[in-house]
Image: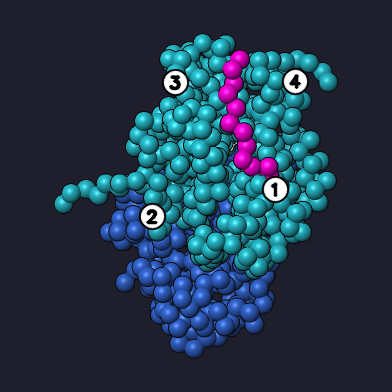
Amino acid sequence: MSRISRRFADLREQGRAGLITFLTAGDPDMATFETALAGLPEAGADLIEVGVPFSDPMADGPAIQAAGLRALKSGTKLRHILAAVGRFRRADENTPIILMGYYNPIFHYGIEAFTTDAAEAGVDGLIIVDLPPEESDEFLPSATRAGLELIRLTAPTSDDARLPKVLKGAGGFVYHVAIAGITGTRSASIADVQPVVERIRRHTNLPVAIGFGIRTPDQAAATAAIADAVVVGSALVETVAANLNAEGKAGPGLVAALHAQVAALAAGVRRVARGK
Amino acid sequence: MPQFIPNSLRSGPDENGHFGAYGGRFVAETLMPLILEVEKAYEAAKADPSFQAELDYYLEHYVGRPSPLYFAERLTRHFGGAKIYLKRDELNHTGAHKINNCIGQIILAKRMGKTRIIAETGAGQHGVATATVAALFNLPCVVYMGETDMARQAPNVFRMKLLGAEVRGVTSGTATLKDAMNEALRDWVSHVDDTFYIIGTVAGPHPYPAMVRDFQSVIGVETRAQLAKAENGRLPDTLVAAIGGGSNAMGLFHPFLDDASVRMVGVEAAGHGVDTGMHAASLAGGEPGVLHGNRTYLLQDDDGQIIDAHSISAGLDYPGIGPEHAWLHDIKRVEYVSATDDEALEAFQLCAKLEGIIPALEPSHALAHVSRLAPTLPKDHLLVMNMCGRGDKDIFAVAAHLGVTL
Ligand SMILES: Cc1ncc(COP(=O)(O)O)c(C=O)c1O
């Protein structure tokens, strides 16, 4: 069983949804990011998304765009991110790591080289925002061979006709984007999301995570009632931004503030009991 | 098994929008249903004679087509070689070829019941053309433009506002055309129900590269008939066009792709020079990658991050190129060369003085290459250059480069 499947099985056992945190790798610098990353499981993250910065993040709002620019400015390269994941993995055998980003840096690294190196570093899954099923034939075989799961995105616009295509070859879990929009802007109401999640579940047995627009412990709790996992990204990235000093470098309280926020979100998620 | 060899170079893309290894639909899942809807609607429109009839009506009566094919006698004499014809798309309403495409897309938007138009723009020419057709068809219009470009193309910003469009300055990334396109895509995923995105060049996810090419192909179709009439039924020997994203070039080239005797040359912007790192020549200085929904040649660093283009011409200042050009480059059907800022400035002034035509800085790059090529060719060689825009928008920038204060 993959690390991601094991983690979702554990969560089911515990009768609760999981918390997935998103931070951009190398934001505001790699050392600070790695300190934050290392403490995420302890703070309450069940799975971890590591954002790979890209110069042209077309699905992201201002907060994650800015995080990407900070990371690139601090010299972050894809190989540094894989090395950071490798160091995390040596200390933590169990928490799944999912790289999330855009296709070009991966394509440029080389499909075979990237999937091999990522798996070796201890990456478990990949979310490649701009690699839809129509284009993933060149990528999926290498990823599968390396033991990486390709996590598919669904959106409010994914209808019954489209879902089978989206979910073919999907691994790990399904990441449902709750709003038609970009990260860090609007929040969806549970009433709007619930029927879409039910539709997705009719097409797959994979766990369903919900993200985009979830910011507070209360929103996390509300979402946990209908999802197998709750993703929080922009709200955490904004905490990074709020804890920079005048030169844009990490302020003294940055990592502690992040971990406190993750603990509060985890408490929100854990408030809600779910059937096994 | 014998390899499949297409008997026409004009039949692409395949059903997934691929031209060889290029093109495709590299978009987020939220956008996927939208581009599939545009594709379906466009296929239906193409098969509907009333769509073509409406398009033809506006091209003739509103845009002013056909544009003349003009024998540039003084340029011909000056270079002393090939016979030079200019395809006068700078005489179109709004001053460039961009409107050929905008008319087509807005008629499609209307057929699809869309009630809001968005666009990206670099030089402002596509923004002006989109704002123009949005006014004509009474649809609200938002144009995204990098703040760097707003500063160097101020007259076009004012034009768009006069036409009733809202111009939204883009500060993200490097605040130029690629960022304007990112922002337009972000707007589109956030307004999936009512909005139509009019892309300004042969880039973006399928079906845009093919659709924009089809709308611009009127340039090549007219050229074929006009030159045949002027030159006893002959085909052109050489076609030359400037390349930003590649729409005016594709419009001129595409109808001739299967005519093996016709040589085609696309001219990219070399900025300060292709080896200076300050240029916009994606084929000469880029590598294949994925951006804005398609795979093509891109200016990028060794980690796959997109690098900013540089050109004196804001309309050529794009770090990519349409995927069909990437394919035509690889199969060597079209030659791609480049011209620097200085060469374009020189051609700009030469054209004004010799022909009484002030060209846009974009076709000035094409003319710079014509000035190198024409003298090497015999006098009965027929060369057609696409004069795809007029230079009114550029006089301030050119004056600044020449050290003149207006
Ligand atoms: C006059 C003119 N020519 C050329 C271009 C470049 O676009 P394309 O290569 O798509 O024709 C522009 C873009 O703004 C333009 O305004």
- Chain B's colour is cyan
Q: Quadrant of ligand 1?
A: top right
Residue B51, compared with residue A34, is above or below; it is below
Q: Chain of mark 3?
A: B
Looking at mark 1, is its residue's CB closer than 8 Å to ligand 1?
A: no
Is B383 left, or right, of A189 in this rendering?
Answer: left
> Which chain is indicated by disc 1?
B
Residue under label 4: B400
* Secondary structure state at the residue bearing disc 3: loop
Q: Are marks 1 and 4 on the same chain?
A: yes
Residue beneath disc 3: B381
Q: Verify whether residue B73 appears in magenta.
A: yes
Subunit under mark 4: B
Residue at image coords 43%, 30%: B234
Q: Earlier in the sequence, mark 3 or mark 2?
A: 2
Q: Nearer the viewer, mark 3 or mark 2?
A: 3
Q: CA distance from mark 1 to mark 4?
A: 37 Å
On whether residue A44 falls in the magenta region, the answer is no
Q: Nearer the viewer, residue A214 or A38?
A: A214
Tell me the residue at 51%/33% (across/down): B229
Mark 1 or mark 2: name the one nearer the start of the chain.
2
Q: Name the one closer to the observer, A102 or A261.
A: A102
Disc with the residue nearer the chain's start (4 vs 3): 3
The chain painted blue is A
Over which residues does the magenta segment extend? B63-74
